[in-house]
Image (cartoon, grey):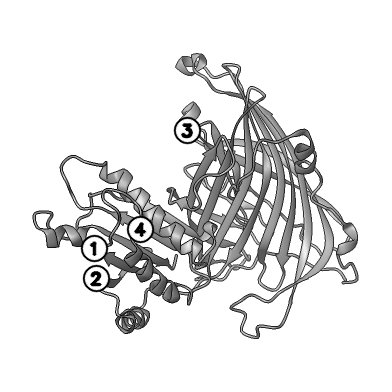
Amino acid sequence: MIKMKGVSRIRHLALAAVLAGLLLPVAFAQTSAVTDSQEGAMLRSSVQDPGQYDKSGGPVKFEFKFKEGDKSRILSHVDEDVYVNYRFSRHSVILNRISMEVTAEHEDGSGDLEGTFMTSENAVNRRGGASTFVWGEEYESKFRRSKLGVYDIRDIYFMPTVRDVPAFPDRELSPGESWTAQGHEAHDLRRQFALQTPYKVPFEATYTYLGTVQAPAKADGGEGTKSRTLHVINVKYNMYMETPRPTGSMAYADYPVAMMGYSDELVYWDNETGAIDHYTENFRILMESSFGNIYEFRGTADAEVTSFERIATEEKIADVEEQIKQLGIDDITVKKTDKGLTISIENIQFGGESAVLLASEKQKLRKIAGILRAYPDNDILVAGHTAHYPGGVDPQVLSEERAASVADYLVQLGVKDKFHVFTQGFGDKQPIDTNDTAEGRAKNRRVEITIMDQ
C-alpha cells in the first residue's frame, strides 16, 4: 500500500503525509469548513453496509506479488480541513502522484521498489480555487517490502509516510476473520521543526476481512467485459506518541510534544495481481507543539492504482507528428522529454501580457485535444514559457497563469478531469531561441503539453 494523506510535511500550516505499502498515495480534494453535521459524517466508520460484501468464498491467503520491471502509477486525493488551536484555518486540496517500479524480486517473495513522490497542494479559506494542480516538489524513495507487507526503509527517506499497512498474517483468512499487526507513520517535519529524520509514530492496526465485491475490468484488461473480484479489508488504528524533551539548543526551539490520531480505511485488494486496487479512508490527526500550538487535520482520502501506456517512443512520436501535420497546425514540434512525449506549441497567442487565450489558440487546442484523448490512462503536464521582455509583467507569474489557462481549457474540453492535469511555469528561464528578434521571441513564447509516461 502506498498512500498519502494530510500529515507528513508541514507546509503553510498544513501537514502533508504519505502512506506506503503497495496501496496508494492520497491527495486532498475540496470542501468547506466542517460543520457539526459534516463532522459526524466525516468521522463515521468506513464500513457503511456490511451486507454488501460476498462472504461465500472460502479461505484466502493474501500476499504482495513483486515482479521485476513492473511499473505503476498511484494517484490519490484528500479532502482535508485544517484547524489551528481548535479554530478552523483552511481547507487543503492535496493531490499526490507516485510513480513506482519494482527493481528486484527476491526468493523470499520480497521486492525492492523505487518511487518518485510528488505532492501538489491547494489550500483555500473559502469554496473554490484552482481547477488544475501545479506540479509540486518531487521526492525519491527506495525500500524493500516483504510479501506480507512489512517495510525495510532507511531513515534518509521520508516517503511513504504510512508503513506496514496492510500487513498480512502468514496463513489463510476467511471472510469475517480479524487480525492485528504493528505499523507506524513516518512524518516529514523538517520545515516546521527542523527534524532531520522521519518523526515515527507507532500503532497497532486491527484488520477485518469483510468479503468480496465485483468490480469492472481494467480498461487495459484485454478481455474488456470480464469483471474482477476484489477482496475488501477494513483497517483501523489509533496512534499516540509523546516526544522526549530535546537537549542542547533544541530544548529552546519549537518541537512536537505529541501526535495522536486515527485512521479507518477500506482496502480493495486484487489477489490475482497481489496488490491494492484502490482504497478509501476517514482520518483525524492532532499534533501539539512545545510552544502550545495544536494542529488538527480531519478529512477523507481515496487513491487509485493505474497502469499507463509508454508513449515517448519513436513510433508514437512519428504518429503524433503525422496527426499534427494532417490537422494543419502550425508552429508545433513533438519530442521526447524526461517525463514523456511533449507537444510544444510555439508562438501561442494570448491577450497582451495576460493569460487570456485567443480564439485562434482555442481552435488549435481543440484539435490537439483529439490526440490527447487517445491516451486515457496517461496524465498530462502543461508547462508555460515566456519570452524575455525588460520590465512589464513578472514572466514567472505570467508563465504559470498561461499554463493554467491552457490546462483549464483542456479540462473544459473533457480531455481529462482536473486530478489528471498538472501545470508548471518556467518564466523566461528556458529559452529555445534568441530573445533579440521577433522570430526568436515567438519561439520562446510557448506552451508545452506532455503526455506523461512515468
Crowd tier of the residue under label 3, counting other residues whose Cα lies within 10 Å: few below 14, some 14–19, many 20 or above:
some
Of helix, strand and loop, which one carries label 2?
loop
In front: label 4 or label 2: 4
Question: Do callouts 4 and 2 mark residues in contact (Cβ within 8 Å)?
Answer: no
User: Which dot, 1 or 4, sits closer to the camera?
Assistant: 4
Left or right: residue 424 compared with residue 52: left
- Find out whether the residues at labels 3 and 4 contact each other: C-beta distance under 8 Å: no
Residue in the foreground of this view, choosing between 142 and 358: 358
Q: Circle 3 sits on which residue?
A: 190
Please tell me how crowded label 4 is: few (under 14), some (14-19), or many (20+) other residues with Cα within 10 Å. Answer: some
Q: What residue type is labelled 1?
A: Asn
Name which of mark 1 and mark 3 comes first in the sequence.
3
Q: Which amino acid does label 4 sit on?
A: Leu
Q: In this view, does 30 lie above or below 323?
A: above
The residue identified by callout 2 is 331
Residue at the disc numbered 1: 347
Q: Are marks 1 and 4 in contact (CB under 8 Å)?
A: no
Q: Measure the alpha-carbon separation of dots 3 and 2.
A: 45 Å
Q: Nearer the viewer, residue 182 or 367?
A: 367
**Mark found first going from the N terminus, 3 or 4:** 3
**Left/right of residue 452 with respect to residue 212 in the rendered view:** left
Q: Name the residue under label 4.
A: 357
Crowding near pointer 2: few (<14 within 10 Å), some, many (20+)?
A: few
Whether label 2 touches label 1, CB < 8 Å: yes
Question: Outermost residue toward the top?
Answer: 252
The quarter of the picture where the C terminus appears is: bottom left
